[in-house]
Amino acid sequence: MKQFDYLVLGSGIAGLTFALQVAPHGRVAIITKKNRAESNTNYAQGGIAAVTSKEDTTEMHVRDTLEAGAGLCREAVVRTIVQEGPARIAELIELGMKFSEREIPRSEGARELDLGKEGGHSKRRILHAKDVTGREIERALLNAVAGQPSIEIFEDHFAIDLITNQKLGEPGPNRCRGVYVLDKRAGVVETFAANVILLATGGCGKVYLYTTNPDIATGDGVAMAYRAGAAVANMEFIQFHPTCLYHPRAKSFLISEAVRGEGGVLKTIQGAEFMNAYHPLGSLAPRDIVARAIDNEMKRSGAGHVLLDITQMPAAFVRERFPNIYETCQRYGIDITKEAIPVVPAAHYQCGGVLTNVDGETEIEGLYAVGEVACTGLHGANRLASNSLLEALVCAHRAGLRVLAQTHPTTTPVIPAWQSGHATNPDELVVISHNWDEIRRLMWDYVGIVRTNKRLLRAQSRIANLQEEIQQYYWDFIVTSDLLELRNIATVAELIVASALQRPESRGLNYNLDFPRPDPAWAQRDTVLRKG
């Protein structure tokens, strides 16, 4: 049994920030199922929303967040995160984070932060590192972690299940005691014990056929917490990013919202602008409205995509502001300074998750959740662009303070080793790949941008059948990362469908043709699910 003071599952901005916070006070294990830099954070292009300009105010940022959240945000949580954001940004810069700057007009070489603007924001407040912000954040945080001798990173380790008092048959309240973890290289399951465990596992984009997320985004943290008895809330609110590159050879490449913030305009394949017919902000409308508008235009015309056109901006500006997007599109034969970019919506962000307070505390003692895996109430029914990295940064810091202020058990119970029983090596891997594909396609077709109860019930029935097959497979065969991910996406798919069926209205990202308008009675009401 490997024993630590703190276990961190995930190596993105939330996990690394928390690890740095608690490292001076004990031994920390960071468990990550790929390499340490492979996280949703690493793929974030746009940036971090925070009030750093004299033209901006906390009240404006709060108002924009509440408006995007469509009546479901927790205002106290929104205020806390927005107010504490600038201080956390300053600490990130101290760690070596380098945000893009620009020269101040009519000044002698002085520079200031280059603030971007994205959909739903009334002011320029997006701090960014060109269009590779996440990559730069990972670099700065991993460099800081490397200098901490009390932090140990376990790469290619896949967390299987949380170990709790209840599972161990101990009396008292449910408390997290450790995690069973698959060492993918060795093919063995190890036991990691700690009295504080942080879920920082990111979201569940791979539950859908088309997503902007990396392959790791399989909802592992939500599935594990749910199986352990934690409450999960608002999983019906899956944000579809309006603009994913549409190309047969491109996989999951996001075209940042910042492209529209800097003048990009959405057009039909015939070249006609269409967003002004859907919202006064046109192409800068909130993401849920833009994604539904594109979906509607595609269905109406039968087109496989729409166009995002930024050719009216100077070519040098486009190349300087969006080097990664420019170079990637060039590889696929698209010069974005001269031609419009073909784009489609794709699953992007999970606004619900494991139910927590603003300090990351869950219903299970000793278990914390921060970042996309958590549901704090910040995002409500629709996340405001670039608020996600802000939430992860602030809540990870607060979780660290909360953990250090509390008294935790000093003893560790005897945790039995993982038992494989009579499990054998899988005989037909096609079962895993087939079920994986079926879940992702049925979620896209039946539980996508626009829903109906009939489609949701059809999805629910099929997922229940698949769950039985997967559970049988799980017990009969030795676990692999592919089987574990399949098990988790099936659980998360079940939660998304069940949550969507609970909410008899259209609000934010949950658009149901059977209930096309929001119901005032459902404002400030969460859909909460617990196992059993």
Image (cartoon, rainbow, N blue to C red):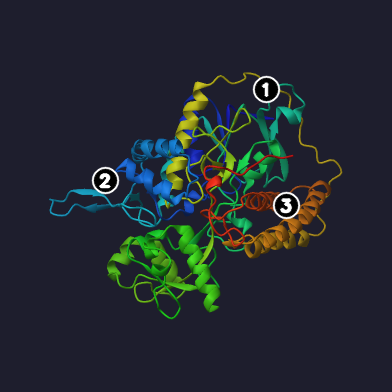
Residue at x-position 38% and y-position 49%:
64
Q: Position of residue 111 (x, y in %)?
A: 21, 49
Q: CA distance from mark 2 to mark 1?
A: 49 Å
**Residue at 48% of width from left, 67% of height from top?**
293
Crowdedness near tag 2: few (<14), some (14–19) or many (≥20) residues, C-alpha within 10 Å:
few
What secondary structure is found at the residue carrying circle 2? loop
Does residue 154 appear anywhere in the picture?
no
Q: Are marks 1 and 3 in contact (CB under 8 Å)?
A: no
Mark 3 vs mark 2: give the one in front. 2
User: Which quadrant: the C terminus?
Assistant: top right
Q: Give, as a three-letter code, the residue at label 2.
A: Ser
Judged from this view, the residue extending furthest toward the bottom is 270
Q: Which quarter of the figure is the N terminus placed in? A: top right
Residue 278 falls left or right of residue 303:
left
In the image shown, does 187 or 484 lie closer to the viewer? 484
Mark 3 residue type? Leu
Q: Which amino acid does the dot numbered 1 rest on?
A: Thr
Which residue is tagged 3? Answer: 483
Tell which circle, 2 or 1, labels the residue nearer the N-terminal end: 2
Quadrant in the rendering for residue 353: top right
Tell me which residue sits at (66%, 31%) in the image.
178
Residue designated by label 1: 412
Q: CA distance from mark 3 to mark 2?
A: 48 Å
Q: Are the residues flagged by discs 3 and 2 in contact, CB closer than 8 Å? A: no
Secondary-structure class at tag 3? helix
* Residue 125, x across and y down, in percent: 32, 49
